Image: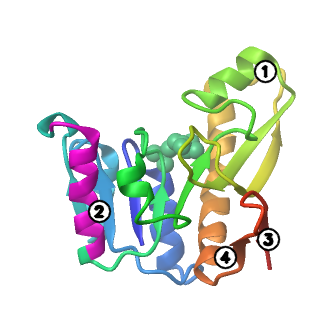
Amino acid sequence: MAVFASGSGSNFQAIVDAVRAGRLDVSVELLVCDRPKAKAVERAQHAGIDVLAFRPKDYGSREEYERMIVGELQRRGIDLIVLAGYMRIISATLLEPFDGRIVNIHPSLLPSFPGVDAIGQALTHGVKVTGVTVHFVDGGMDTGPIIAQRAIEIREDDTADTLAARIHAIEHELYPLVIGLIKQNRATLLEDGRTVRIQ
Ligand code: GRF
């Protein structure tokens, strides 16, 4: 599989650690990153994982760099794309060849608070419960079929930092678990195109 990240890459690290610890049976072949200086790139280099770093502005369009990415993924026989803090919209160029084989993690209980700064959105709204969602990726913004969710209570004294820390801890546990289920074909999309059955 390949992991796509743009920033810190703590979820990428959690996946790599789970593989190392024997808790997750996958081969992480590649990190794709749209910011060559991101911490995620450093983490991959440290772990000895190949990096495909690119700068979108070096390409004429999204389609152009996605075509380049698809070529790299196909050359390496990648069959699962794991988005972990990849801050770019994915278009049909990438979606079509990997239909049903792209997953994302989002720091809220979708469909609440899609898009950027889901943690800030939850705090601003004053909700008492938020959480983490892992879902298949479709053409929309955080709209694809939901595979797994975990809820977490918001405390009165929570700040964006304290809440983010608890959310990240849950993400680091949940994502490797869900990736394992997908790899074992235990998370399947039903015919309604919406419900994911976990076996
Ligand atoms: C995570 O909170 C994830 O849910 C969201 O982006 C963040 C990435 O964090 N999509 P990191 O780069 O894995 O530390």
Do residues under tags 1 and 2 come within 8 Å of each other at their CB atoms?
no
Q: Which badge, 2 or 4, is on the more N-terminal residue?
A: 2
Q: Position of residue 16 (x, y in %)?
A: 45, 69
Give the alpha-carbon distance from disc 3 to disc 2, as whole Å: 28 Å
Residue 58 visible in image: yes
Q: Secondary structure at mark 2?
A: helix
Q: Kindly identify the residue that appears in the image at 23 percent across and 76 percent down.
A: 75
Residue type at numbered disc 3: Arg
Q: Which badge, 1 or 2, is on the more N-terminal residue?
A: 2
Q: Kindly identify the residue that appears in the image at 17 percent across and 33 percent down.
A: 57
The numbered dot on residue 181 is: 4
Give the alpha-carbon distance from disc 1 to disc 4, as whole Å: 36 Å
Mark 2 = which residue?
70
Mark 3 = which residue?
197
Q: Secondary structure at mark 1?
A: loop
Q: Secondary structure at mark 4?
A: helix
